[in-house]
Image: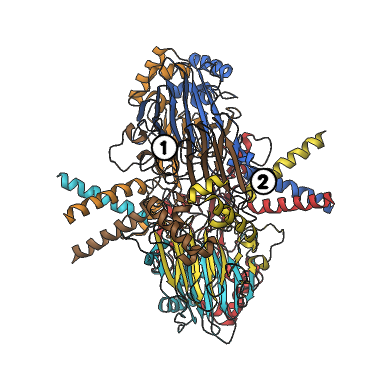
Chain colours: A yellow, B brown, C blue, D orange, E red, F cyan
Amino acid sequence: MAAYTRFFTYLTLLSVTFSVAYATDPTQLQDFCNPIMAVTADDFFFANGLDKSGDTSNRLGSAVTPVGAAQLPGLNTLGISMARLDFAPYGLIAPHIHPRATEVLTVLEGTIYVGFVTSNQPDNKLFAKVLKKGDVFVFPQGLIHFQLNVGKTPAFAISALSSQNPGVVTVGNAVFGAQPPISIDVLSKAFQLDANVVKLLQSKFSTSA
Amino acid sequence: MAAYTRFFTYLTLLSVTFSVAYATDPTQLQDFCNPIMAVTADDFFFANGLDKSGDTSNRLGSAVTPVGAAQLPGLNTLGISMARLDFAPYGLIAPHIHPRATEVLTVLEGTIYVGFVTSNQPDNKLFAKVLKKGDVFVFPQGLIHFQLNVGKTPAFAISALSSQNPGVVTVGNAVFGAQPPISIDVLSKAFQLDANVVKLLQSKFSTSA
Amino acid sequence: MAAYTRFFTYLTLLSVTFSVAYATDPTQLQDFCNPIMAVTADDFFFANGLDKSGDTSNRLGSAVTPVGAAQLPGLNTLGISMARLDFAPYGLIAPHIHPRATEVLTVLEGTIYVGFVTSNQPDNKLFAKVLKKGDVFVFPQGLIHFQLNVGKTPAFAISALSSQNPGVVTVGNAVFGAQPPISIDVLSKAFQLDANVVKLLQSKFSTSA
Amino acid sequence: MAAYTRFFTYLTLLSVTFSVAYATDPTQLQDFCNPIMAVTADDFFFANGLDKSGDTSNRLGSAVTPVGAAQLPGLNTLGISMARLDFAPYGLIAPHIHPRATEVLTVLEGTIYVGFVTSNQPDNKLFAKVLKKGDVFVFPQGLIHFQLNVGKTPAFAISALSSQNPGVVTVGNAVFGAQPPISIDVLSKAFQLDANVVKLLQSKFSTSA
Amino acid sequence: MAAYTRFFTYLTLLSVTFSVAYATDPTQLQDFCNPIMAVTADDFFFANGLDKSGDTSNRLGSAVTPVGAAQLPGLNTLGISMARLDFAPYGLIAPHIHPRATEVLTVLEGTIYVGFVTSNQPDNKLFAKVLKKGDVFVFPQGLIHFQLNVGKTPAFAISALSSQNPGVVTVGNAVFGAQPPISIDVLSKAFQLDANVVKLLQSKFSTSA
Amino acid sequence: MAAYTRFFTYLTLLSVTFSVAYATDPTQLQDFCNPIMAVTADDFFFANGLDKSGDTSNRLGSAVTPVGAAQLPGLNTLGISMARLDFAPYGLIAPHIHPRATEVLTVLEGTIYVGFVTSNQPDNKLFAKVLKKGDVFVFPQGLIHFQLNVGKTPAFAISALSSQNPGVVTVGNAVFGAQPPISIDVLSKAFQLDANVVKLLQSKFSTSA
């Protein structure tokens, strides 16, 4: 019986813990912290991933290779991560949001049209720029932004993000590809689209997502 | 010459300051802080705003009355704000994001269908619910969410937000109503829409925004 | 032997974890986080609690219905919570402190006299106001504040608080109702009260607490 | 006209700034930051204050000598401060709260009875201890605590606090000595005291505060 | 099979948890939090340690007695700690860094020469001072600093640190005493020392560390 | 006289502000914030800097090109920055610390030996690795680390840092090149070096710093 109680106590500890273990972007309480008991240099190391192009053979012609705490355990609790962005000619990273991070992008190859849109107050202003090799651009946390390769050749960039797990909300997928789908009433009214157009978009995104 | 130098020193101070003055949701360093030199109880007081319905005579049939630091100076640096949401019958608050706050909504009148969509990993999952009077629902920071009055009668709710200035990014307006407009290449490819449909949407949102 | 060691390792993990699991109001590291493995919309939902009056049939004639992470698991790690405050005619929420949150109150029914007192430097200044339906008032974190229904009819309000677990320290109960009791020397000297008055108060609060 | 506009722009900057300048206990953005243009070692230095006893010839027989950012400019933005606590024989530091800091106390001379009371949930539990020279005790942020010299001889202690400006709310002074006074209805009901006793206390505290 | 899966689920929970349990200096989510189930006043109490001199019979003639969360569980999650510093005549606490805390030092006995060095931009400026009994000095987070007893008699000081686990990186030990050693190429080039001098230093520090 | 008073009020505002304006790495209170009144896309843009090698014709054969808030105003308040690191053959970035940031490095060209050393507890452990093109490595905040080009050809890398102004403390320069110099007693005792060797090092670093 005592064992039974202890078992539930354990479960509680574990579950509560779990929720927090994944939930905090804290300041540090030790030099670093790594789940694995015996930490080695390899825990702070991500083997040559960022020199290889991601697979851009998809509808949008783009690929993102994230290097966050999930890929690089040593980043755990340190509040930062990186990613490589690859673009086929005219490839696009569709309008999206990082709910937990600001992004700083550096173009390493190609010519990329980038932009972000400010919030409603005072107005949804677009800040856009065509970036060349070596240019750097900032996308503030929580704002919708996009990147488009405007060149005939492949392009790629490295981004730094201010969270070990920035999160990505691709607007089209979240709005038209959500499962279960958002009600057509909401979407047709919100986007001023005919219900049939909304249904068509939902079918497209549910398959292409 | 010294005066000249000082002048620039001042300008620097002012500009740098400005950027931070508006930029921080800090922990407190004193009981409260208010720009006006002589603080009175009125600085912590917002006169009877939240018992009055906002004007819902617009395309979406909804209105938001915010009470943040801009409306209530006493909230400055305290990291929280409120808002009243009003809905005409079938009125909608279109899919939007708060880049700097989680929202907790309480229905005070009517029946409201609400939901939010998680980020791409693992999937854009919809968490939706029909709320009745007295129900409470949480919309986590940075996720797309919406509220629709599904009743024949007006509805209203009170929301608490975890920032003195949560910000609002209404997806449709930011994507299709941005000024200057986002390039049609980006939008047609991202949303799988014909260029003419995108142009039509941009014209609709630039006027209705 | 190895098993024995591992057992203690586990215990350590659990205990250390426990302390933190409950202890942090962090920024988020994912969209949300919930102890239960399979998260559903119900985890972000609190069923119609805030339209029902709490039971005010007590000495003070008031009741607080909190909606924090303990009541609404979806609030976990999101740094905000709500509460409904109910007052019988002339009902009082006695002077208290929230050690971890600022409170923003909105009157939904009745007329409520509210106030908070600043810290010792420069002086213990009272900021008080009589609030009517629709009025909003701010109580900064860690300051003593109170709410009194000054009307002949029941009153109620909704409050937003800037923590998922704000905590409440009711001054009278903490000072005179603590268990074990604070020494009479401390209380009589601090409050300039005769030892017998202190004893009387302690007996009253130990029963009414 | 342009000058006129600039003048108001400046005023806005200044006022907004002021509110934040005092309001944040931030992480650092540079090694340190000090208002005075030419920083010297003296800005990080507080001359021999903490070896001198404060003046305990007052009703409570105690004195607090704070060393925060106001006394030691180099502490600005560093989130920590110190204080020396002096006690005449049987001297008391009355029940109080630090709204913005946890306190860690070290007894350097004498024997001091200290304690703090937890919040209402689950109960107002007293954690108290008699401390001797060299003992250390923790008072968590936002909880009511006190210190009483229980020896025949003077005593003193050094405290560290987790804010550059912790704030002090002495319960008796805030409740009974607030100016203007809290209404007698509130206090007599809250503290279960006869209105005349409340009036007496208010007169005592308004003079002795 | 289910058991097998659960076993791994547990491991994951534990490991992930472990990393965070030690990794966060969070704001509080409850009055305090202590690993041990039944919390008592002793959990906030550290028995008379800070009145006893540490053992300074070592090469540097100094000793540090930390009182952090590891020594005083009640400090867990409260973001502050203390330490006693002891010095034999001419004893030294060698140049070091606290990666996670600012230090505020108070001299209780003796005469101590202290200083810290700013970062590279604009320049590595030394801020140094000779402190007497009762003097207070601040060492900002992450900057190299040192303390030297410049008197013929023993000296001691109390320090407050703005983390429950500030960490200490003693420059000499980290640079010349690291295990495995940093390559001689790095050290001879960085410190403009002959390779043999570097080897000598490494042998000295590996034994004296 | 009023003018005189106002003048001092202004000065106070400015000075206090200055200290905070530079001192905070805050969460955001608006989409972004930029000192310049009229913000344009160029404020979030840093023109092609990161494709150009820095000048490595110096004693160490290395160069760092930072892109922080000072170079890219749009980063202000967003808590992140980048840098390009260039190395001549066998070029070195000497052991240093970032007091306010964790660094994540990605090798874009060449072969680089990197490492960091943990704090004193439990031990100064070296975590080192030879990185090739595309490899990523993490240097936790406040720990001593270094980068050495171990190839015959130039090398370069891009680093992300978790602060808009990470700060750099190069150990050799701070310890032996500080101005005014740290006393020879401190350095010879701390580093177990003959006084003459210390003097020699100080002369070398004061010129080469």
Looking at the rendering, which quadrant does residue E38 occupy? top right
Q: Position of residue E179 (x, y in %)?
A: 66, 69
- Pick whichever, D128 or C109, lies toward us: C109
Mark 1 is surrounded, within 10 Å at the Cα level, by few (under 14), some (14 to 19) or many (20 or more) other residues, namely: some
Q: Is residue B44 above or below residue F27?
A: above
Q: Are marks 1 and 2 in contact (CB under 8 Å)?
A: no
Q: Chain of mark 2?
A: A
Q: Are marks 1 and 2 on the same chain?
A: no
Image coordinates of residue F201 in percent, x first then y, are 47, 77
List the single residue furthest toward the left: F1
Q: Amino acid at mark 2?
A: Thr
Placement of the C terminus of chain F among the 4 image quadrants = bottom left
Q: In the rendered image, is residue D180 in sight?
A: yes
Residue located beneath label 1 in the image: D64
SS for dot 1: strand
Instruction: Give neighbour class at mark 2: few <14, some 14-19, many 20+ (Cα, 10 Å).
Output: many
Residue sitting at x 48%, y 30%: C158
Q: Which residue is mark 2?
A: A17
Q: Position of residue C81 (x, y in %)?
A: 53, 37
Residue E124 in view (yes/no): no
Going by the numbered disc 1, the residue's amino acid type is Val
Residue drawn 71% across the image and 50% down it:
E13
Question: Secondary structure under badge 2?
Answer: helix
**F68 or A102: which is nearer to us?**
A102
